[in-house]
Image (cartoon, rainbow, N blue to C red):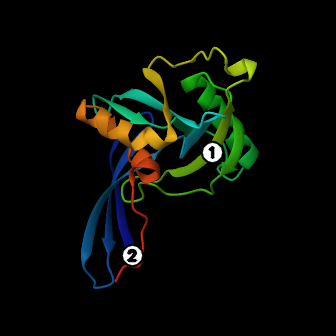
Amino acid sequence: MQKLKEQIIAQGKWLRLKKTLFRNSKGQIVTWESIERLQQKMIIIILPRMVPSGRIVLIRQYRQALDSTVLGLPAGTLECDPADDQTVIQEALRELKEETGYHGIPLDLSPPLRSNSGIIDELTRILQVKIIESSAVNNNPVQQLEAAEEISVHLIPEQKVKEYLVQQQKLGIEIGAGLWYIFGMDKPLTADK
């Protein structure tokens, strides 16, 4: 694809909608609309597991774009350098504390990933954390939500997450795709003939 022309259709405080013309390898002109983040271009997704119970920390959050409630993992936008692992981890732990009230210990941080590359330019990183249930800081978790956030915390045994997702969807709760990627698939991909 060869980019020919780009036009800004609309712009707000955080997002810009663009229309771009491309020429494909066959010489055809292709029009594409996309979203560009203006400030924070990185999303952090946190996969928190309680230790020793193995429960997974999920959040149910009202999402304005859908005018609906979505079940997902704690997440947020970060304003730091995506390549600065230490700062990414610190900010992710802060986000976990804000949304759930829990203090986590980092276990594994993904490299920068693209999750919605067909529509938006943002990077995504995933941080796996453990939450020590017996730790005094986790005895009475208190959320520190922003005005635009309405979040409830749900602690679900890992082996029951899929069942919980199906049950919640039947009740009208939207399910974040990331949860299904991790917990919803029963059968591994195999080279069946």
Residue depicted at x 63% and y 57%: 111
- Name the residue tied to disc 2: 2
Circle 2 crowding by C-alpha within 10 Å: few under 14, some 14–19, many from 20: few
Q: Is residue 16 left or right of residue 107?
A: left
Q: Is residue 186 left or right of residue 73?
A: left
Q: Closer to the camera, 27 or 155?
A: 155
Residue 11 shows up from this direction: no
Q: Are marks 1 and 2 in contact (CB under 8 Å)?
A: no
Residue 71 tag number: none
Q: Is residue 57 left or right of residue 185?
A: right
Residue depicted at x 40% and y 27%: 61
Residue 128 tag number: 1
Q: Closer to the camera, 8 or 183?
A: 183
Q: Closer to the camera, 63 or 59?
A: 59
Q: Secondary structure at mark 1?
A: strand
Quadrant where the N terminus lies? Answer: bottom left
Q: Position of residue 120 (x, y in %)?
A: 41, 52
In the rendered view, would you say 168 is above or below 128?
A: above
Q: Position of residue 174 (x, y in %)?
A: 30, 36
Q: CA distance from mark 1 to mark 2?
A: 38 Å
Q: Amino acid at mark 2?
A: Gln
Q: Amino acid at mark 1?
A: Gln
Residue depicted at x 71% and y 41%: 106
> In the rendered image, which quarter is residue 64 located in?
top left
Q: Position of residue 158 (x, y in %)?
A: 51, 41
Q: Position of residue 69 (x, y in %)?
A: 33, 29
Q: Is residue 114 left or right of residue 91?
A: left
> In the rendered image, which quarter is residue 60 located in?
top left
Mark closest to the chain's N terminus, 1 or 2: 2
> In the rendered image, which quarter is residue 34 located in?
bottom left
